[in-house]
């Protein structure tokens, strides 16, 4: 932890030992009515949920779990072959009421606090851009956060996540199964195919989130796989 980037330390008991080296960052929204309510829940042993960091809408960063410990933020999840995402990741909760309580854009002070914290974590743990993901990416059947208002494009421009490619062509796969296999190859859990498509749309083409496979998301997925195959999507 870089103490210059953290405003408060509030120790959560909800953690245990890691079984994997750190290779990912998972971004969340709290999905609760207030920052205090979220903080209390993440420090409640009965809740069995936590994160390494929470950033409120004013940009105040609170550390809850030391990075060397396994926080309980991702739940049942999967990304690029890793099924113990909690062990392999650092979890950052962004205070936002979420889709249940009045989802809204993430304010500038919050983003201004996230960017240097994320950059520092990525640098210290050598985390590739492709492994900076949202909760919906790693748990598409269960989660929607951080959601369609999160500014992934900004992170991509700063080298803190993969850039969002433009589809150079509308690409229609031969059948839905072919698209799902390509989506799995990129990293998603496709157990619930429609949910995986919605998660992909929410991250890479948030203007339309309907779970339907179309030529535009086919083209975007093709560009992402192409970048990965030539070694640029790290």
Image: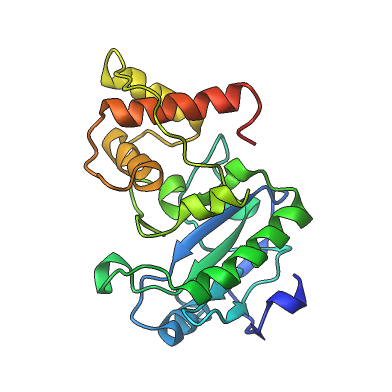
Instruction: Please tell me which residue lies in front, 22 or 174.
Output: 174
**Colour style of the rendered protein structure:** rainbow
Note whether residue 120 is visible.
Answer: yes
Which residue is farthest top? Answer: 174
Q: Which quadrant of the structure image shows residue 52?
A: bottom right
Residue 192 picture location, percent across and down: 31, 37
Q: Examine the rendered structure and indicate whether residue 97 appears above or below residue 79.
A: below
Q: Examine the rendered structure and indicate whether residue 107 appears above or below residue 207.
A: below
Residue 124 picture location, percent across and down: 78, 56
Residue 183 picture location, percent across and down: 42, 29
Total numbered labels placed on residues in the image: 0
Identity of the residue drawn at 50% across and 30% down = 224
Q: Examine the rendered structure and indicate whether residue 75 appears above or below residue 8.
A: above
Quarter of the picture containing the N terminus is bottom right
Identity of the residue drawn at 43% across and 23% down = 182
Identity of the residue drawn at 70% across and 65% down = 67
Note whether residue 48 is visible.
Answer: no
Q: Is residue 163 left or right of residue 103?
A: right
Instruction: Please tell me which residue lies in front, 234 or 144.
Output: 234
Identity of the residue drawn at 35% across and 23% down = 179
């Amino acid at each position: 932890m870089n103490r210059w980037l953290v405003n408060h330390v509030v120790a959560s008991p909800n953690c245990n030992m890691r079984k994997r080296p750190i290779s990912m960052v998972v971004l969340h929204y709290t999905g609760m009515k207030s920052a205090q309510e979220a903080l209390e829940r993440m420090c409640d042993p009965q809740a069995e949920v936590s994160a390494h960091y929470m950033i409120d809408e004013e940009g105040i960063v609170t550390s809850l779990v030391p990075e060397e410990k396994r926080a309980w933020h991702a739940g049942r999840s999967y990304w690029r072959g890793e099924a113990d995402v909690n062990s392999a990741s650092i979890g950052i909760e962004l205070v936002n009421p979420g889709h249940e309580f009045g989802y809204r854009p993430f304010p500038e002070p919050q983003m201004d606090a996230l960017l240097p914290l994320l950059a520092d974590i990525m640098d210290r743990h050598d985390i590739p851009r492709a492994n900076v993901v949202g909760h919906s990416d790693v748990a598409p059947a269960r989660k929607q956060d951080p959601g369609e208002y999160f500014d992934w494009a900004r992170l991509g421009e700063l080298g803190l996540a993969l850039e969002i490619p433009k589809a150079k062509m509308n690409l229609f796969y031969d059948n839905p199964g072919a698209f799902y296999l390509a989506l799995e190859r990129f990293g998603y859990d496709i157990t619930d195919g429609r949910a995986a498509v919605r998660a992909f749309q929410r991250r890479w083409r948030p203007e339309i989130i309907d779970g339907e496979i179309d030529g535009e998301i086919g083209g975007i997925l093709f560009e992402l796989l192409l970048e990965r195959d030539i070694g640029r999507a790290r």
